[in-house]
């Protein structure tokens, strides 16, 4: 212990606490930056939705007023405006800035107006449809990612073999097929021709809703073809990416050192090769979630699967602008949320990202 009474242990403890505080401040600043960017992006999406719908000539407000006057010629202009306001939650005669504030207030409180076609609150329709879309897309992404990892890793280990060549060709062919083409083929062959799977709906009509085996089995049964359409046409590209990552990792020097140390092949495959090959795919998978949500519009219409995409397609067909805007907003925000999660968590999955090392965490 020195003359000032501070020992070596005390000095080390002081710098250690200072380092931990610096890490916490850095992490907090990083999280706040990510949250701020996500909020700004969401705000920009809401603003863009408002601008596209209301600022274009002959937009939905003018169309709705014209339809009301055509079908109800005795209605006064004030009555027409009140009816339009009840649907879109915005006074069509108010200045554009006032309409914008009303729209932001409605979105913030979950009031997205009323559907013209279904005569029901847009928020209620989307709240009922969203869990079904999330279920199908989550299952699709999970199966697609898992299958791509397994097949891609095997292709990497068997580089140049017949299995590698055949799998690569199959992956390229499947990836080149649009998901909606696969969906049409599956529903026609397995649904209409062979009758193995239902051709529409989210569950059997005679099933009691609840945590029971028939209900849960019916949900998976009705979602099987939509999920298969996404997985079959999507996993090939990711498998090829996984193959390339695996081959790259297998050529690293630390793999040779691990083999020379006599580490078990299973440990090398899982801990060294698998983990480092999967990391570059993490961001692409989370971003892919948002774009799979966008693809749900056509997919759910093909299978008459009543999710957010199905209702958006119906809204476009019937020119139901309040429902169209609500569905578009939810699907677009799904992309923003997916990118936000990827941005916020990637350095946790791979501490080397952003110039940081493992000791920083």
Image (cartoon, rainbow, N blue to C red):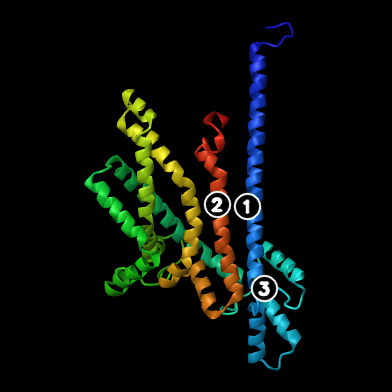
- Choose the circle earlier in sequence order: 3 or 2: 3
Which residue is labeled 3 in the image? Answer: 54
Look at the numbered disc 1 and give the secondary structure of its residue.
helix
Q: Residue at 26% of width from left, 49% of height from top?
A: 165
- Residue 327 placed where, x, y %? 56, 68
Residue 78 lies, with reference to residue 169, above or below; the image says below
Residue 207 seen in the current view: yes
Pick the front one: 339 or 302: 339
- Residue 66 placed where, x, y %? 65, 86
Q: Residue at 73% of width from left, 85% of height from top?
A: 79
Q: Mark 1 and mark 2 in contact (Cβ < 8 Å)?
A: yes
Which residue is labeled 1 in the image? Answer: 38
Identify the image quadrant of the C terminus: top right
Dot 3 surroundings within 10 Å: few (below 14), some, or many (20 or more)?
some
Q: Mark 1 and mark 3 in contact (Cβ < 8 Å)?
A: no
In this rendering, the label closer to the viewer, 3 or 1: 3
- Choose the circle earlier in sequence order: 3 or 1: 1
Instruction: Count the labels in the image.
Output: 3
Dot 2 surroundings within 10 Å: few (below 14), some, or many (20 or more)?
many
Q: Residue at 67% of width from left, 89% of height from top?
A: 69
- Snapshot quadrant of residue 344: top right
Residue 130 lies left or right of residue 47; in this view the side is left
Residue 341 lies left or right of residue 224; in this view the side is right
Identify the image quadrant of the N terminus: top right
Look at the numbered disc 2 and give the secondary structure of its residue.
helix
Look at the numbered disc 3 and give the secondary structure of its residue.
helix
Residue 205 seen in the current view: no
Q: How far is disc 3 from disc 1 in space, using C-alphas?
A: 24 Å
Which residue is labeled 2 in the image? Answer: 339
- Choose the circle earlier in sequence order: 2 or 1: 1
- Residue 285 placed where, x, y %? 46, 51
* Numbered label attached to residue 97: none
């Amino acid at each position: 212990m020195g003359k000032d009474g501070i020992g070596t242990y005390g000095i080390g403890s002081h710098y250690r606490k200072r380092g931990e505080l610096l890490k916490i401040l850095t992490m907090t600043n990083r999280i706040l930056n990510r949250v701020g960017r996500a909020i700004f992006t969401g705000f920009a999406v809401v603003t863009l939705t408002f601008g596209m719908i209301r600022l274009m000539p002959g937009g939905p407000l003018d169309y709705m007023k014209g339809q009301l006057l055509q079908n109800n010629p005795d209605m006064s202009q004030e009555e027409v405006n009140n009816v339009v306001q009840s649907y879109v939650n915005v006074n069509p005669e108010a200045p554009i800035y006032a309409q914008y504030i009303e729209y932001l207030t409605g979105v913030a409180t979950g009031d997205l107006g009323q559907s013209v076609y279904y005569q029901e609150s847009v928020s209620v329709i989307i709240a009922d449809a969203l869990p079904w879309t999330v279920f199908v897309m989550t299952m699709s992404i999970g199966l697609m990612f898992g299958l791509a990892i397994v097949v891609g890793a095997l292709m990497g280990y068997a580089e140049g073999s017949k299995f590698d060549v055949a799998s690569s060709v199959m992956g390229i062919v499947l990836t080149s097929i649009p998901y909606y083409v696969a969906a049409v083929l599956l529903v026609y062959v397995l649904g209409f021709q062979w009758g193995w799977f239902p051709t529409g709906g989210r569950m059997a009509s005679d099933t009691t809703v609840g945590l029971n085996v028939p209900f849960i089995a019916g949900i998976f049964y009705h979602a099987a073809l939509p999920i298969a359409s996404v997985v079959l046409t999507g996993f090939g590209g990711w498998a090829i990416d996984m193959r390339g990552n695996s081959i790259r990792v297998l050529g690293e020097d630390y793999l040779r050192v691990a083999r020379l140390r006599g580490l078990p092949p299973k440990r090398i495959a899982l801990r060294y090769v698998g983990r480092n090959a999967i990391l570059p795919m993490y961001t692409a998978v989370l971003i892919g979630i948002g774009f799979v949500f966008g693809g749900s519009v056509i997919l759910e219409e093909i299978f008459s699967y009543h999710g957010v995409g199905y209702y958006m397609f119906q809204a476009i067909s019937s020119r139901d602008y309040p429902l169209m805007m609500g569905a578009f907003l939810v699907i677009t925000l799904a992309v923003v949320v997916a990118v936000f999660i990827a941005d916020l968590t990637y350095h946790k999955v791979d501490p080397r990202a952003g110039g940081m090392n493992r000791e920083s965490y």
